[in-house]
Image (cartoon, rainbow, N blue to C red):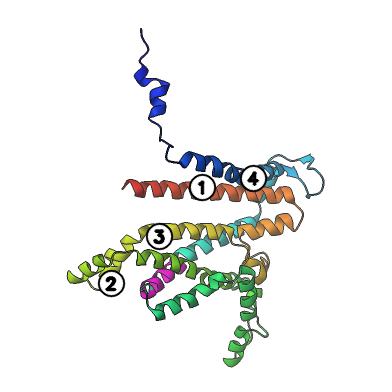
Amino acid sequence: MEHDASVGPATRFATWPRLSDGRLPAILLMLPPALLLFTLFVILPLMDAGYYSFFKWNGYGSPSEFVGLQNYIQVLHHPVFYRSLLNTVIVLAVSICIQIPLALGLALLIYRKTPTNTAFRMIFFVPFILAEIASGLIWSFVFDGKVGLAAGLFRYLGLDPVFILADPHWAFLAITIVVIWKYFGFHMMIYIAALQGVPEELVEAAKIEGAGRAAVVRYVLVPQIKPALVVSGFFAVVGALQLFDVVMPLTGGGPSNSTHTIVSYLYSFGLVRLRIGYGSAVGVLLFLAAVGVAVLYQTQLNKEVRR
């Protein structure tokens, strides 16, 4: 029986995407450096963290005391870890329920290109430009119970000073306020860019049909910027998982470990205490959570594309 060449390797190869338009040299030139950097700064550190997580190791010399899954068991039985996880979820909820709606509302007010709106955009975007450490130090002064703005307000109202950052009931609320202030401008700029890409003809057509301002926003503008909303939500999740630089200058995770996020928990209970194996276990769990978020995001994005 003769071999059917029409379904052979040559035919299948001929159906592959052609790279005769100059893309192949670009791929061969740019892909190896990118893969090298990704391997050096992502893949290898992750492999090292996974390896170290099976050892009780203080970071000096080579790890030799193999403990298996003991580090993971200790993490999953540590109450502060669950408090840190809860705080991370709270930050995410605040970002989704308060920060993003606030950013969207402001974007809808100032997305049109006018000198006044440009000035407002700059004002609202400045907090995001500031370094996280600087923002934390500024707000630590604001919340200071002796010499800060909060202390002055309490004195003006005739009330006893409240040391907000030293109170377990108020400290994390202060952190969430700083997070909203710091990052809502970033989300606002995403929405402004998306809104400026909405065809003006759609808005005018909706007005001609008798739609009011609220109807235009609900049925025209918001549906048109849905991809931007998805991207913004993804950044909110990633930001909650990475939150660290704001927490450390404000509270350092205190008082009584009540304001830790996952990353500050890793830093305080892993690196600071020279428990590198333990910290590596936390890092592996954080990585798995990030991968889960990325997979979920990509799955939902693919569903939206199919629609």
Q: Main secondary structure of the magenta part?
A: helix
Whether pointer 1 and pointer 2 mark residues with C-beta atoms closer than 8 Å, the reply is no
Q: Earlier in the sequence, mark 3 or mark 2?
A: 2
Q: Is residue 234 visible?
A: yes
Q: Which mark is residue 292?
A: 1
Q: What's the CA distance linking mark 4 and mark 1?
A: 16 Å
Tell me where residue 211 appears, x and y as whole percent.
21, 70
Q: In the picture shown, does residue 22 fall above or below 172?
A: above
Closer to the chain start, of discs 4 and 1, is 4
Residue sitting at 27 percent across and 67 percent down?
200
| Badge 3: residue crowd in 10 Å (few <14, some 14–19, many ≥20) | some
Answer with left or right where residue 13 lies relative to residue 241: left
Residue nearer the viewer, 179 or 157: 179
CA neighbours of label 1 inside 10 A, class few (<14), some (14 to 19), many (20+): few
Disc 4 marks which residue? 46
- Tell which circle, 3 or 4, labels the residue nearer the N-terminal end: 4
- Residue denoted by label 3: 228
Disc 2: which residue:
214
